[in-house]
Image (cartoon, helix red, strand yellow):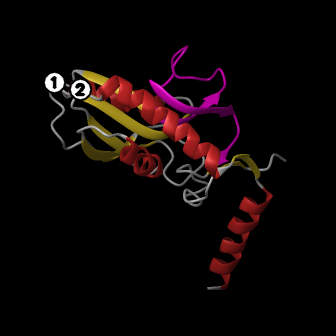
Amino acid sequence: MYLDLIRLNDLRRMRDEADLLVDGPAVEAAIARMAAGIAARLADADPLVFAVMNGGLILTGHLLPQLDFPLEISYLHATRYGNAISGEDIEWRARPDANVQGRTVLVVDDVLDVGNTLLAITDHLRELGARETLTAVLVNKLHERKARPGLCADFTGLELPDRFLFGSGMDYRGYWRNAVGIYAVKEL
């Protein structure tokens, strides 16, 4: 119990000391812009939307009510990190179980960092027969380490510096996905 309190206090202190990069209203405005772009592109496409667990959960929950057209939703869970802060291999925790054959698919995730996970997901969906795969991310991290030169999502809410981000779906060691706004861990 004592160690749990220390850990929770450390997590609270880390958030309190972090740099708030984007406040809640600005995140909501970015999501509204994304929704408008998605609606313009997919309103007549009968899309299947996949929320990427766990990071895409928050964005998907804010995004879907703003899409006033018929769509189906499902989820998948592929990760390189788990609750760690780095990782290498893609781990499928829940593969897509909805039929994507001949469908337009939109994959919704929290952040495009290097992009290996998002590429693995979209490649897998194409292998399953998706006619078209599109991606939506709340944050694109600005750096030159992308898995493929020029890699970007089809719909992006915000472009932010290459820092360790959390909040609005992004986590710090499994915590703070629920933080309102987007924070960057304090640089040492």
Magenta-drawn segment: 136-165
Coordinates of residue 129 in the picture (x, y in percent): 18, 25
**154 w.r.t. 87: above or below:** above
The residue at 71%/76% (across/down) is 6
Coordinates of residue 37 in the picture (x, y in percent): 44, 27
Which quarter of the figure has residue 131? Answer: top left
The residue at 52%/51% (across/down) is 169
Which quarter of the figure has residue 91? Answer: top left
The residue at 30%/38% (across/down) is 49
**Circle 1 residues within 10 Å: few <14, some 14–19, many ≥20:** few
Type of amino acid at the residue the image marks with label 1: Gly
Q: Provide the residue designation for mark 2.
A: 45
**144 w.r.t. 180: above or below:** above
Q: Quadrant of the N terminus?
A: bottom right
Depth-wise, is mark 2 or mark 1 nearer the camera?
A: 2
Q: Earlier in the sequence, mark 2 or mark 1?
A: 2
The residue at 46%/46% (across/down) is 59
Verify CB contact (< 8 Å) between mark 2 and mark 1: no
